[in-house]
Image (cartoon, grey):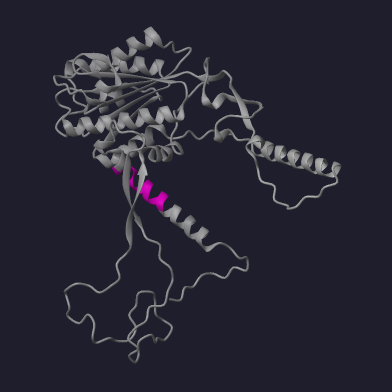
Amino acid sequence: MAIFKDYNPIDHDRSLEDRRRHKQLVEKSIKENLGEILSHESIIGESKDKKFKIPIRGLKEYQFIYGKNTPGIGSGDGSEKRGDRIGSDRQQGKGNTGAGNEEGEDIYETEITMEDVLEYLLNDLELPNLDKKKFSEILSDKSKKKLGYQRHSIRPRLAKKRTVIEKIKRKQGRKRALKEFGLSEENNRFPFKEDDLRYFKVKKKPRRESNAVILCIMDTSGSMDSTKKYLARSFFFVLANFIRMKYVNVEIVFISHTTTAKEVNENEFFHKVESGGTYISSGYLKALEIINERYNPSYWNIYAFHASDGENWNEDNERCIKAANELCQLCNMFGYVEILPSYNTISIKYRLIEGVTDKRFIAVTIREKEELWKALKDMLKKEIREG
């Protein structure tokens, strides 16, 4: 089979180019399918090694396709465009509505892990308005300092350059010894030995990091059916994992509410089922209580995220707006996510937009599960900083 490619006078590895193109296709398909992955209920509680299948379009090369060598096939007057059929082939396609005979497009599946998915998120998202108000000293993997060399350690800390130097020193010592005794080297091979190996000696050093706390507030009332709840949980699951991967010193607080609110642990937040009416203000007031008790805004960057279907008792709307404004005064950002809202009532989102004018308030809507990724991007998109 003949294959055409652009002439390049510099010889290069063709397989390297194919791998590069393959990587581009994989990345494109992952980004196109992020919405479907993130809204999948099975991601909740899964480890970072959980695998997802992604459809990838196959690579195609230019090639000759031979006809039947009948007169007229392959000829033209120069005005033809790609896809035009030239000549006639009476044996094909006349009145035939059965199975086609055209070549199909190659599509196959590849697998990526949850950790891979979150890595793609890291490139596009960040916590907005993150200020270095105050600092705390913590020990982290990012704060390791190299302090010389040692003979024994783990292989990732191998000091290659220093190891080569040790080998050269041993080789030079051997040459001097042979010369003193009037001997010559019998062969040129001089392999590494265990004694040549040197490893970096590292010490953890306290590093100043910005304090931040994320308050996850979720409506668990009766109007939040199973579909709404799993979308809300998916949103918070991705948010929590994204935060833990990207930021070192961040605490996460989980709050669930019906007509009353309570702080819960992570397992209860993602798996416990509740029912009852809805006072959205209860979730906001619980968040304010926790902030006042544990997270001084002078020291902490505070972010609050609330997910609900937008249904609320009318008698609670005024309290809800008041509490939302108080949260905005304390938070770097307050985000509200409305999930599958009902079209029969005025949702709390519109009341919040009218009553909360602070620029730190962001409201988004998820009308179908594929919009979960867009909602995350709208809330956590990178700021354009003027240089």
Magenta segment main secondary structure: helix
- Position in image of residue 123 (x %, y %): 46, 39
Quadrant where the N terminus is found in the figure:
bottom left
The residue positioned 32% from the left and 59% from the top of the image is 107
Given the current orientation, which residue lies at the most extreme top position?
A: 293
**Is residue 30 located in the magenta-colored stretch of the structure?**
yes
Please tell me whether residue 272 is drawn above or below residue 197 in the rendered image: above
- Position in image of residue 247 (x %, y %): 46, 26
The residue positioned 38% from the left and 40% from the top of the image is 117
The residue positioned 55% from the left and 35% from the top of the image is 156
Q: Is residue 303 left or right of residue 306?
A: right
The residue closer to the viewer here, 111 or 373, is: 111
The residue positioned 38% from the left and 32% from the top of the image is 379
Q: Which residues are magenta?
A: 26-36
Figure quadrant of residue 122:
top left
Quadrant where the C terminus is found in the figure:
top right
- Position in image of residue 203 (x %, y %): 59, 22
Please tell me whether residue 84 is drawn above or below residue 162 in the rendered image: below
Figure quadrant of residue 374:
top left
**Is residue 379 located in the magenta-colored stretch of the structure?**
no
- Position in image of residue 322 (x %, y %): 30, 14
Answer yes or no: is residue 239 visible: yes
The residue closer to the viewer here, 83 or 183, is: 183
Answer yes or no: is residue 319 visible: no
The residue closer to the viewer here, 375 or 49, is: 49
Q: Is residue 385 left or right of residue 188?
A: left
Q: Is residue 175 left or right of residue 119?
A: right
